Amino acid sequence: MKRSDLERLSDAELEKLYNDTQSDIKRKDRQYDMLPAAWADRAGAPAIAELARAERAALLSFLPTHRPWDDVTAYDVRIFELEQDVGRKMERVRELSEQMANEPQRHADAVAA
């Protein structure tokens, strides 16, 4: 609006124009504040909805309801079973090593008897 147009308005019309302008500014400020990271430079960034979908997908990939942990749990169980099996085998190897170490003495005792 030109200055000459403003000069022709009455006080009531000027006040109404001022209030309308202030309302528009406040409304635009509220809209601006509602945008995520409104202060950030988003030039070249994907749309907010696309970012939200990507963030949700990333979050769901870590949640147990997505159930990626079933395989991990199965591997943990299998590892535990193998560790127990290794423990049993090592105990058996220790027993057999002990028998081999004691074998000459057993033979000597058998011959002496």
Image: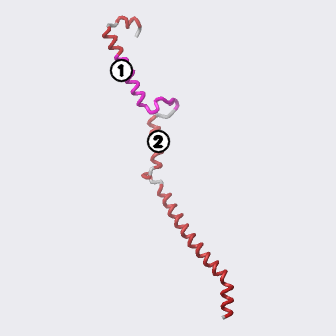
* Up-down relation of residue 37 to residue 6 (above or below): below
Position of residue 26 measured from the top left corner of the image (x, y, whole percent): 38, 23
Question: Is residue 101 rendered to the left or right of residue 29?
Answer: right
**Range covered by the magenta-colored residues:** 19-44
Residue 55 numbered tag? 2
Distance from Cα at disc 2 to Cα at disc 1: 35 Å
Residue 43 vertical placement versus 74 (above, below): above
| Mark 1 neighbour class, 10 Å CA radius: few under 14, some 14 to 19, many 20 or more | few
Dominant secondary-structure state across the stretch colored magenta: helix
Viewer-closest of 49 and 84: 84
Q: Nearer the viewer, residue 65 or 38?
A: 38
Name which quarter of the figure residue 22 lies in.
Answer: top left
Residue at horizontal 48 percent and vertical 45 percent from the top: 58
Q: Is residue 37 magenta?
A: yes
Dot 2 falls on a residue whose secondary structure is helix
The residue shown at (36%, 14%) is: 18
Q: Which mark is residue 23?
A: 1
**Amino acid at pointer 2:** Glu
Assign the C terminus to one quadrant of the image. bottom right
Report the amino acid beneath label 1: Ser
Q: Quick one: SS at disc 1?
A: helix
The front one of 68 and 110 is: 110
Q: Would residue 83 appear left or right of 49 to someone viewing this image? A: right
